[in-house]
Amino acid sequence: MTEISDRIPPPAPSVPPEQIKAIPVRHYGRWVAGAVIIGLLVLIGIAFSNAKINYGVIPDYLFDPGIVTGAWTTLYISVLAMLLGVVLGIVIAVMRLSSNPVTSTVAWVYIWFFRGTPVLVQLLLWYNIALVFPILNLGFYKDEMNQVMTPVLTALLGLGLNEAAYMSEIVRAGIQSVDEGQTEASHALGMTQGKTLRRVVLPQAMRVIIPPTGNEFINMLKTSSLAYAVQLPELIKKATDISSTSLAVVEMYFVACIWYLFLTTIFSIVQYYIERRYARGSSRSLPPTPLQRMRKYLRMFGSFRRPEVAR
Amino acid sequence: MTSLAKDIAPSTGGQPMVRAEAVHKSFGLSHVLKGIDLEVNPREVFCLVGPSGSGKSTFLRCINHLEKINAGRLYVDGRLVGYRQQGDKLYELKEKEVSAQRRDIGMVFQRFNLFPHMTALENVMEAPIQVKRETKAVARERAQQLLDRVGLGDRIGHYPAQLSGGQQQRVAIARALAMQPKLMLFDEPTSALDPELVGEVLDVMRDLAADGMTMIVVTHEMSFAREVGDSLVFMDDGVVVESGHPREVLMNPQHERTKSFLSKVL
C-alpha cells in the first residue's frame, strides 16, 4: 500500500544558495499615492476636530445606563430576529426546492414580497396589524391585537420575516452547491430524504451558507435601528431620547456608532471561528486561528529559525 | 483474518439475487435501456462491460432504484424493486419502503462520494447508526473492523481530503459493507483512480468475492473480470449483446461489436 508520506519529495537543503543582491525597481507611483492618501486623511481629521462637536461628552455617555440597555436591546432583538430568519429561511428554502408546485410557488411569492418591499414598511405594517386583525384568537388565547403586538414582538416579526426571505435564498444556494453524488450515496445507504438533508447535505452546505449569513447578521445589528420607528427602545431610540434632553445630538450618534462598531467587531470574530469549524474536511489542514498566527509570528521574531511547517 | 462480509444475509431460497425482465429506461427522448433481460445468482460476481453510453451504469442505478425504470420488471431477492404488485396493479413504494430496500444493497461509486465532513470512521458508522439505529459502540467496533480489513486501520481519523483516491474508495467499500448488504453494486470503482492505485481497490473486491458476496461490477478492468468474474455481460446501445463466462466472452467473442470493443480495450 502506498502511503501519502512516501510520495512527498525529500525536504530542500536547509542552507540556501547565495542570495541575489540587486537594486530593486523604484515604485515612485506608490510613494505619490501613499502621500496623497495620508494627506487626505489628515485633512478629514482636521475638519472633524474643528467641527462644533463636543467630543468630551462621548466617554461620559458611552456607559450611560440608557445607552447600555439600548445596546442590549439591539443585541437581543438582532439575535432573536436572526434566529427566526434562519429557521424560517431553511423551511422556505426547502419549500422552494420541493417538487410540490404549491409549496414552491408559495415560497417564491414569500421571497418576492418580503424581499421586494422596504423593511421599514414591513415593520410599520406589523405595527398596525390590528387594522386587519383587531382581535387575536388562538382558541386557547384571546386578546386585543394592540395588546399583543408589543414593540419587541413587532420588531421581531418585522425584522425576522424579512430576514427569512434573504436567508432562504442563501440556504438554497448552499443546498444546491452540494454535489449530487452526496445525496445519491446517502440514498444508496438507505437514508431517507430528511436524514440526507440533515446529516449529509446541510452540514456541507454550511460552508457556503455561513459567510453570507455572518454578513446578514452584521447587517441585522444595524437594520434593527429601524425598529426605532415602532417604539422599540433600542440603541438609536435611546440615543435620540438622551440627545433631546442633553442637546448633544451628534455626540449621541457617535456614542451609538461606537457601540455598533463594538458589536459588529465581536461578531466578525465569532464568524471567523464558526467558519473554521465548518471548514473541517474541505481542506487538508485548517487555517490557523488569529491567536495561533500571532504565536507563530512571535516565535519567528523570537528566533531566526525557519518557521515551523504548519501541521 | 476476519471475513469482509461475514454476515452476508442468506438469500431466500434458490431464486436469483437479481432478475431483470425486459427493463426499459428513457431519459426524455433518449432511450437508454432497450429491454434488458438477465439473472444474477447469489454468490456470483457479475461483470457488466461495454462502451460508455451503453447503459451499464444506468442499469446498475436502476437496481437500487436511484433511477426509475419505465417498463419491464426488476426483482432483487425475489422482491420487485421500487413497486408493490397487487393483482395487475403496480403501486409505487413509499420513500421509507424504498429506503428499506436499499439498505440491503450496497453501492460503490466511481467518484467515491464519501461524506467530506466526516472522518473515515464516521463515514462508515453513519448509516448503521442513522438507518439501522445501532448504538455508537456497536457501529464503531464494526467500522473499525471493516477499516482494518480494507487496510486502513491506521487512517480512521482522517478526512476524505486527507486520503488518496484508492484509500477513499476502500473507505467507500467499507461504508457500504457496514450495512451488511446481500448485494454489492460497483459502478466503475477504479475508473477515477491513478493506475498505481487500482490494484489496492481490486484486491479488496477480490477478497469480498472470495467471501461469497454477490457482486455486480461495471468495469473496464478486463483482467479483473477474467480472474474474478463468474459471468459477464457485454452491453451496447442499451441492449445485451453477448453474455457468458468471462473467459469465453473475452477470449472468444461471437459478435462483431464485442470483437471490435475488446480489440480496443484488451
Image (spheres, rainbow, N blue to C red):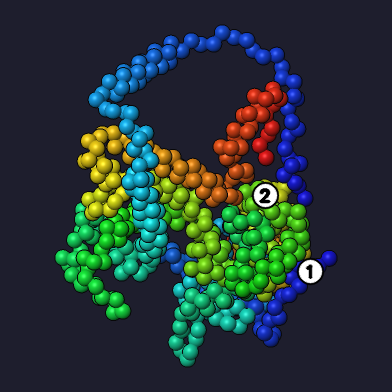
The residue to which callout 2 is attached is B163
Dividing the picture into quadrants, the one containing residue A157 is bottom left
Question: What's the residue at 52%, 57% (across, down)?
Answer: A203
In which quadrant of the rendered view does residue B6 lie?
A: bottom right
Left or right of residue B181: residue B26: left
Residue B135 point in image, percent of width and height: 66, 71
Position above or below: A307 against A289: above
* Residue B91 spot, x, y in % from top left: 45, 83
Question: From mark 2 to mark 1, how far is it between C-alphas?
Answer: 24 Å
Q: Could you say whether the residue bearing mark 1 is in a helix, strand or loop? A: loop
Identify the residue at image location x=65%, y=26%.
Answer: A300
Report the disc number at residue B3: 1
Image coordinates of residue B151 in percent, x first then y, are: 76, 57
Q: Farthest residue in the right direction?
A: B1
Foreground of the two, B73 or A200? A200
Alpha-carbon neighbours of circle 1 within 10 Å: few (<14), some, or many (≥20)?
some
Which element type, helix, strand or loop, lies under badge 2? loop
Residue B170 vertical placement versus B61 (above, below):
above
The kind of residue tagged 2 is: Leu
Viewer can see residue A7: yes
Q: Residue furthest bottom?
A: B87
Residue B219 seen = no
Of residues A201 and B61, the one nearer the viewer is: A201
Specify whether A213 is left or right of A235. right
Q: Residue at x 75, y 32 (%)?
A: A10
Q: Earlier in the sequence, mark 2 or mark 1?
A: 1
